[in-house]
Amino acid sequence: MRIDKDLVAAVATPLVLAILAEGRSYGYAILARVRELSGGELEWSDGMLYPLLHRLQSLGLLTAEWGASPEGRRRRYYAITDAGRRALAEQRSQWATATRTLDRLWRSAGAERMPAIGGA
Amino acid sequence: MAGAALEARISEWRGFVARGRIDAAEADELESHLRDRIEELRTAGLDDDEAFLVAVKRLGAVDALSREFARANSARLWKQLVAPAAPARGGGLLSAVLLGGLAAAAFQVLRIARTAGAPDTGGGIVDTLVLRSMPVVALLALVIWLLLRRRSGVANALAALVPLTAVTAAVDSYPLALSSAALVLVLTHLPVALWLCVGVAYAGREWRSTQRRMDFVRFTGEFVVYYVLIALGGAVLLVLANAILGPVIPGIADGLLQWGVYSGAVWAFPVAAWLVESKQSVIENIAPVLAKIFTPLFALMIAAAVVVYAVLGLGTAFNRDLLTVFDALLVVVLGLVLYGLSARVDGRPERLLDATGLVAVVGALLLDALVLASLAGRIGDLGWTANRVAALGLNLVLFVVLAGAAWLGAAHLARRAPIARLERWQTGCLPVYGVWAAFVAIALPPAFGFA
């Protein structure tokens, strides 16, 4: 299944913030985590992650610093800030409302009229 | 570990990336990512060559990448997330040229109708009517072109055109003599007020968004650069035409001025906007460099001015001309800092630029305080005039904006506030300039008897 690009774009910010809320991380590991969580269905071109990270950083939602990988290579680590946590909480309640609303429709009395998952 | 052949290919890739608009730190980050990916693929059983090719492919085309980095501070970025961005949009030239021509023709008709229709009552009032309608016609053409290009809805078109028409209609009937201070006020403030309407047409429904307002600031700066370039070219053409035809056709200078310069000045508005929109990659590289060069120079000049005036005092040197110079300087500094802000790339620290920008802002703030004090003294001694009201209002607005910018700029330098707060403050103030300018153009001339 290929997810619509507007939806991927909308999901990317809360996804990145939520992954960093688990602990500081770097670009490659963030992508690996996204792939792991979505079973490989929610993916985008690797290089497109970094402009998003830089943007969130300039909004003050993330901080970044250079560190070293276990093999001793330079690596840029990102960590979420308090402002980032607030933004994430806000995004989370928005997404909860959106998914709850849709979910009620999928499960409502007229659910049999909805196209089946995977049947599109 | 990676073999020598693989290392060679990675450094070749680095060289290729470096030719784009990605700077060294960003390239380091991408290289680190590339190596992680190669390592994973090799563990999965691919050989060096295969792993390298797949990893590079996954990283995305370098062209698309550098474009993304270059545009990282525009909110449109994520629209091209999955499918890499298309090249810059073409088209629109024909409509810009036609609309510009139409506007120039409309202006000439208006000029002839106005000069022929009304007998000159003295004081050059008719000439000033012509002079005043030029920016209006030109900006109207620009607004219409933007609305057409954006395929804006009716609501947006009305939001841009109604205020434009209303302000123009209010001011158009004023009898302003050529030598009056009121004319200068209208000529300087009316375009600023109308430029706000251009902003509405430019940003459309997203006019509240900081990013979109920053885009408009960028558009404004690039528009000025292109307009000046066109004006320089036009000036060379007309000066040469005058020099070569002047000896045989006496009086051609007036004709060239009225038909050539006036028409060209109007025509160039939509054309310069088209250049900004379609040739963005050309100027995008120049503008941040200009901001980086001139921000420190202006900071130096402002600091010198602060020291000189602090030591010598403003004293008797302060008069209307000096006040105008001061205000022009303050506006230029604010514009430069704002433009420098719009030209920065997200996430890339620019501490030197931020620091020099802060010096310029604080210096401007001090000069502004000096001007305000002298102005208050003059108003106390000599009473109110339209000029002094306009100057006092402008300096108060500038003072508040500069104070906010200095505070947030210092907080940003101290790493206590993200740059986004400064951006929000600066772009939030944009409508204030337009509203104040509209007030000056509409209310002050009648309040002071069009003197």
Image: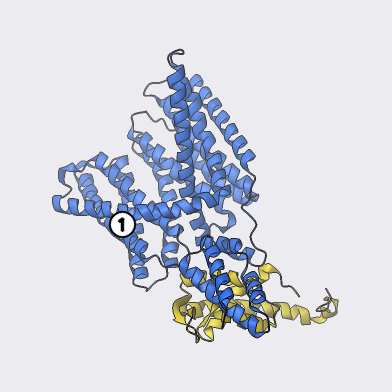
**Who is closer to the viewer here, B437 or A26?**
A26
Q: Residue tagged by mark 1?
A: B360
**Who is closer to the viewer here, A7 or B164?**
A7
Instruction: Identify the chain drawn in blue.
Output: B
Q: Amino acid at mark 1?
A: Ala
The x, y position of residue B353, in whole percent, is 36, 61
Quick one: quadrant of the N terminus of chain B? bottom right
Residue B110 vertical position relative to residue A17 in the rendered view, above or below: above
**Who is closer to the viewer here, B234 or B392?**
B234
Quick one: quadrant of the C terminus of chain B? top left
Q: Is residue A92 visible?
A: no
Within 10 Å of disc 1 (Cα), the crowding (few <14, some 14-19, many 20+) is many
**Chain of the residue under label 1:** B
Q: Is residue B330 left or right of residue B377?
A: right
Image quadrant assignment for residue B6:
bottom right
Residue drawn at x 58%, y 54% is: B204
**Who is closer to the viewer here, B37 or B384?**
B37
The x, y position of residue B202, in whole percent, is 55, 50
> Dot 1 lies on which element?
helix
Instruction: Identify the chain drawn in yellow.
Output: A
The x, y position of residue B172, in whole percent, is 47, 34
Here the colouring is by chain
Q: Is residue B166 visible?
A: yes
Residue B145 vertical position relative to residue B124 in the rendered view, above or below: below
